[in-house]
Every structure is written in structure tokens, then in C-alpha cells.
Image (spheres, rainbow, N blue to C red):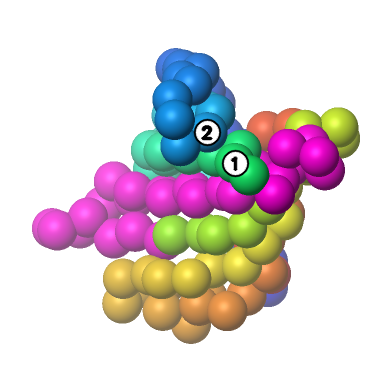
Amino acid sequence: MPLTYTLVRDCLNNVEDNAGRWQIEGGKVFEKTQHVANYSSVKRVSCGTQEQNTAMLWITLFFLKGKPPENMTLHGAHDFNSGGEIGSVSAASPSFASRIGKQFSRVVNTLTIS
């Protein structure tokens, strides 16, 4: 059964340095109407991705319940033309370990993990 979350951005920063262009984003994660986690997203445009208008992407979801908090990290690509994001779950704490290797997609503010 897929997990579906709504990401609500609280902050967005664009940074350019010798390593490339970075976009750092963060905010809240909702499951239906319940705030279940916070997220941090980093996109990096670097040599080899500029021509395709794409960026490497890392997203970590930090779930609110549990001590220490549970988390899930996603790796993939962001397409600046469409705004879409795709990839897979690369790491997770025990509650979400079964999702490692599962595909994700983000369209606007909807994140779906298969």
C-alpha cells in the first residue's frame, strides 16, 4: 500500500558556490490532515546536470513520534522543467525499513512512496 504525504514548505533558500547551485527546502509533512513529520530537501545542480536542467535530490522525512525520531531518506532527481521528482528510498529507521528500495515520486506538494 503506497504512502501518500502532503509537503508544506516553510522555507526555501537558493545558494550558488564553486560546487554548483543548491536549493535547500524544508517544512511540514501531513498525512491527510495530521502533521506527522518535518522534511528537509536538498537539490544540487552541478556539472553534467545543467544541460538537462535537472538536479540531484535528497529528501529526509523526520517523523514526530518516537524517541529517537524515525526517519526516511529518499534519493533521486528533480526535473526543473516539469518540477517533478523521482527516485527511491535509500535509508530508513526500523519503522520504515521495509520501504528501502521502494520508488517515490513528488508532483508539486504530493509525495507518494510505493
State how far apart marks 2 and 1 are (Cα). Answer: 5 Å
Rendering coords of residue 34 (x, y %): 47, 37
> Three-letter amino acid code at disc 1?
Ser
At label 1, counting other C-alpha atoms closer than 10 Å, the crowd grade (few under 14, some 14-19, many 20 or more) is: some
Dot 2 lies on which element? strand
Query: Residue 69 shows which numbered tag?
Result: none
Front residue (pair 31, 18):
18
Q: Residue at x 70, y 49 (%)?
A: 48
Q: What residue does disc 1 label?
A: 46
The quarter holding residue 27 reads top left
Q: On screen, 14 above or below 19?
A: above
Whether the residues at callouts 2 and 1 have beta carbons within 8 Å, the answer is yes
The region drawn magenta spans: 48-72
Dot 1 lies on which element? loop
Q: Residue at x 54, y 29 (%)?
A: 21
Q: Residue at x 44, y 59 (%)?
A: 73
Is residue 81 at least partly visible in the picture?
yes
The quarter holding residue 83 reads top right
> Three-letter amino acid code at disc 2?
Gly
Rendering coords of residue 50 (x, y %): 73, 37
Q: On screen, 97 above or below 33?
A: below
Q: Quadrant of the N terminus?
A: bottom right
Rendering coords of residue 33 (x, y %): 55, 34
Q: What residue does disc 2 label?
A: 20
Q: Is residue 46 magenta?
A: no
Rendering coords of residue 71 (x, y %): 34, 59
Q: Residue at x 41, y 49 (%)?
A: 61
Q: Quadrant of the C terminus?
A: bottom right
